[in-house]
Image: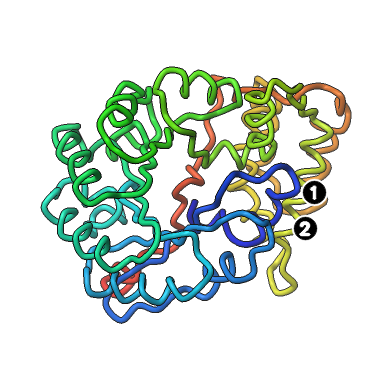
Amino acid sequence: MQDVTDLAFMQMLSEYGCPDYYVTEYFRVYTNSNIDKKILKSITLNTTGRPVFAQIIGESIPDMLRIAKQLATYPIAGIDLNLGCPAPRVYRKNVGGGLLREPETIERIFDALRSHIPGLFTVKMRVGFDSTDNFERLLQLINQYQIDLLSLHGRTVKELYRGGVHYDLIRQAVQTVNCPVLANGNITSYIKAEQVLQETGAAGVMIGRSAIRNPWIFQQIRDRFAGKPVKVVTLGDVYRYIQHLYAITYQDDLREKSHINSLKKFLNFIGTGIDSEGKFLVGMRLVQSKDALFDLCDRYLLTEGDRPFAIEPYENLVARPSCEDPHPSPLPQEREQN
C-alpha cells in the first residue's frame, strides 16, 4: 500500500501479529530512476523476521531489469510486479493496472524479467482493466513464464474498490495456474478470509486496507485456522493502536496540523468499525490538532473501552480516500508534464 506500508508500519504490525510476508511500497521505475531510499529501508532495516518482497511498477523493460538487478543485491525474498494499481494517474501512464489492456506488453516484460531474476518472481494483478476479456490470456502467461506466486484482486481496474469481488474468477485462476494464488479484495476479517478461502480454494489471502483498520487480523486468521480462541478487539485496544500510530508517524520537523492530517489516511479505515452512525468519522475529519484528536478518541473509545470493535466494517460507512492507493504525489513522468 503506497505511502502506508513503510518500515515503521511493518515494524508496528509485528507487535500485533505479522503477516507471513510483506510486500514493499512500489519502486517506481522509469528512465534514469533510482531506488527509493525510503522504501529501501523497509528491506534493509526490517527486523520483523518476515520475508520482504520488493515491489516494482513500470513499463520500460531496460529500466525494470536495471532496478530488479540492483534490488537483488539486497536481502529480498523476491521481486513482485505490480499489474493492479487502479489509480487513474498511474494507469494512464500505462503502468500498474493499465498494462492489463496489453497482454503483448506484459508478455515481453515477463519474458525479460523471468530470465534475469534469479530468485522468486511474483505478480500482483487484477482480473482485467475494464473487462475480463484478457483474463484467460493473462493466466496463460502466468503459466508460460513460470511465475512463482499470483496475488489476484477480484475486480477490474475500473471497478476500483466498489461493488462485489469476482471470487469466481479467483477460483478460476486457482484451477488454471501452476503457482499458488492469493485471494485479494474485501478480505475484511478473519471470518471473511475463511469464507473466501473456502469459496476460491486459494492458497492464502493478501490483505491491504483491512490491516490498517485492524492490525490484529493476521493473528486472528492464524488462530481461527489453528482452532484457537480468536482475540476480541475492544475499543480500548483501538485507542492504544491510534496512540501507536501517532507515535510512529511523528516527526520533529512536521507541523502538528500536517501530522494529524497524515494520520487521517489510517483513521478513515479505523473509524468504519467504531460506531455504526459514523460520528467518529465525521468528527475525525474535522480535527486539526493532537488535543482535538485525542479528545475525540476519549469520547468514542475510552468511555466504552470494553466494548468490542466491530469485526466487520459497518456497511453504511465508507473509508475515504482509499489508502491502498492514496498517491498523494504524482509519478515522476506526470511531474514533468504538470
Image x and y of residue 78, in percent: 43, 60
Type of the residue with mark 2? Ala
- Picture quarter with the C terminus: bottom left
Q: Residue at x 29, y 27 (%)?
A: 175
Type of the residue with mark 1? Gln
**Contact between labelled residues 2 and 1, with CB atoms less than 8 Å apart:** yes
Image x and y of residue 5, in percent: 56, 54
Q: Nearer the viewer, residue 115 or 164?
A: 115
What secondary structure is found at the residue carrying circle 1?
A: helix
Rendering quarter of residue 60: bottom left
Image x and y of residue 298, in percent: 85, 37
Left or right, 324 with reference to 136: right
What secondary structure is found at the residue carrying circle 2?
A: helix
Q: Residue at x 76, y 43 (%)?
A: 241
Left or right, 167 with reference to 47: left
Is residue 234 visible in this depiction of the protein? yes
Q: Residue at x 11, y 52 (%)?
A: 104
Q: Which residue is mark 1?
A: 243
Is residue 257 visible in this depiction of the protein? no
Q: Which residue is mark 2?
A: 247
Rendering quarter of residue 138: top left
Q: Residue furthest bottom?
A: 32
Q: Is residue 330 above or below residue 66?
A: above
Instruction: Name the disc covering residue 87, or none.
Output: none
Image x and y of residue 19, in percent: 60, 44
Spatial distance from mark 1 to mark 2, Cα to Cα?
Answer: 6 Å
Q: Residue at x 35, y 31 (%)?
A: 154
Q: Is residue 177 above or below residue 166?
A: below
- Neighbour class for label 2 at 10 Å: few (<14), some, many (≥20)? few
Q: Nearer the viewer, residue 78 or 238?
A: 78
